[in-house]
Image: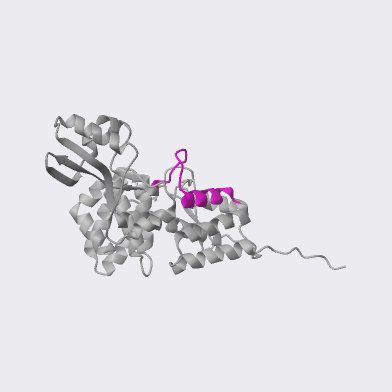
């Protein structure tokens, strides 16, 4: 008798290819992509992928750890009346909020916990500003009036305002994470055409989607044939060589910055190249790893034949939230603006 050849289950691989097509097409909503990820997680047996996609779709609960890309900068505003005068959109710095608010961690950042579908709808409001309220805003408003000492002052509403493009940046971060996730899996698909193993999917989720990655030391590089192999160690990322004004390049991927600067200079964008170098120095000196990842993503997108302005803008806006000095430094802001506008 002939031996029975086991049938290879290709459904997970086909679903992964479908997600890849939808991502590259750019017309499929993020909600649909995440729904397919839930199915893919079921096919591959990856609980991590199902959990992440489900939370992105349904929203994060009070007990859940919300990813950092869902927090964006905002302006605190209030509608206040004094006597017969009404002041709408009065800006309030977080340092001038009542102590009860500051002690509770209330500041100029807003974390979006709702499902990604609702966030997509908010992001699609054109150039209109997005305003949200936070739990306890009414209590904070009452305390503001009490501390003012003015019996005729009344704060009618306290809210946080941000641009729709900043909200759109959350969606772009999710889609970028999905693209990296798919790329990670596609690069390691089995040769027999079957779908990815659960371990491979879990690893991709951990590395790409949650950002929980072991950092690598690239100081030592050996070659084997035509392939460069880095000697990896768990620890801070060190790229070997550094910028002239950076002491320890363990936050910024120097090779990405250098490549972007060279390309910009060759294209005549000298001002933007200088801005990028200054920005890299600022990020490195800050020690903020999320800002470093955003800058790396910015440079990776910049290296594409046709960089997507939405992703460049989202990465830049997040860096400004993390490092306000970047946005207030004229030479940096002007040089980057030439790239994203």
Quarter where residue 86 is shown? top left
Q: Magenta includes 315?
A: no
Query: In this view of the protein, which residue sits in the foreground, 150 or 294?
Result: 150
How many marks on residues?
A: 0
What residue occupies the far right of the structure in this picture? 1
Does residue 209 show up?
A: no
Q: x%, y% of residue 298? A: 35, 58
Query: In this view of the protein, which residue sits in the foreground, 242 or 103?
Result: 103
Residue 113 to residue 268: above or below: above
What residue occupies the far front of the structure in this picture? 84
Query: In this view of the protein, which residue sits in the foreground, 23 or 303?
Result: 23
What residue occupies the far left of the structure in this picture? 84
Task: Assign the N terminus to one quadrant of the image.
Answer: bottom right
Quarter where residue 76 is shown? top left
Q: Magenta includes 61?
A: yes
Segment tinted magenta in the rendering: 46-68
- From the viewer's perspective, is 329 left or right of 242? left
- From the viewer's perspective, is 335 left or right of 171? left
Query: In this view of the protein, which residue sits in the foreground, 120 or 306?
Result: 120
Residue 238 to residue 271: above or below: above
Q: x%, y% of residue 150? A: 14, 32
Task: Assign the C terminus to one quadrant of the image.
Answer: bottom left
Does residue 154 show up?
A: yes
Q: x%, y% of residue 173? A: 40, 55
Snapshot colouring? one colour
Q: x%, y% of residue 98? A: 24, 32
x 33%, y 45%: residue: 110
């Amino acid at each position: 008798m002939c031996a029975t050849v086991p049938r290879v289950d290709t459904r997970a691989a086909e679903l992964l290819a479908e997600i890849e097509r939808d991502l590259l097409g750019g017309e499929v909503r993020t909600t649909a992509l995440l729904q397919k990820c839930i199915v893919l997680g079921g096919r591959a047996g990856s609980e991590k992928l199902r959990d992440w996609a489900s939370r992105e779709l349904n929203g994060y609960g009070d007990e859940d750890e919300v990813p950092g890309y869902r927090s964006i900068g905002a302006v605190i505003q209030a509608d206040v009346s004094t006597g017969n005068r009404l002041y709408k959109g009065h800006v309030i710095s977080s340092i001038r909020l009542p102590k009860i608010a500051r002690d509770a961690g209330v500041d100029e950042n807003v974390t979006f916990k709702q499902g990604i579908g609702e966030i997509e709808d908010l992001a699609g409001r054109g150039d209109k500003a997005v305003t949200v309220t936070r739990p306890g805003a009414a209590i904070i408003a009452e305390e503001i009036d009490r501390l003012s000492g003015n019996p005729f002052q009344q704060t009618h509403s306290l809210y946080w305002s941000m641009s729709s493009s900043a909200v759109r940046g959350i969606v772009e971060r999710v889609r970028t994470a999905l693209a990296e996730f798919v790329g990670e899996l596609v690069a390691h698909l089995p040769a027999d055409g079957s779908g990815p193993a659960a371990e491979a999917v879990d690893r991709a989720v951990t590395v790409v989607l949650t950002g929980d990655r072991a950092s690598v030391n690239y100081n030592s590089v050996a070659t084997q044939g035509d392939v460069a192999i880095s000697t990896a160690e768990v620890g801070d990322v060190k790229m070997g060589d550094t910028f002239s004004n950076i002491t320890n390049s363990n936050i910024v991927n120097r090779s990405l910055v250098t490549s972007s600067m060279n390309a910009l200079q060759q294209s005549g964008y000298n001002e933007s190249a200088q801005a990028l170098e200054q920005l890299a120095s600022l990020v490195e000196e800050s020690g903020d790893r999320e800002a470093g990842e955003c800058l790396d993503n910015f440079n990776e997108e910049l290296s594409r034949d046709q960089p997507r302005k939405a992703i460049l803008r989202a990465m830049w806006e997040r860096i400004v939230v993390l490092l306000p000095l970047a946005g207030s430094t004229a030479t940096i802001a002007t040089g980057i603006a030439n790239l994203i506008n």
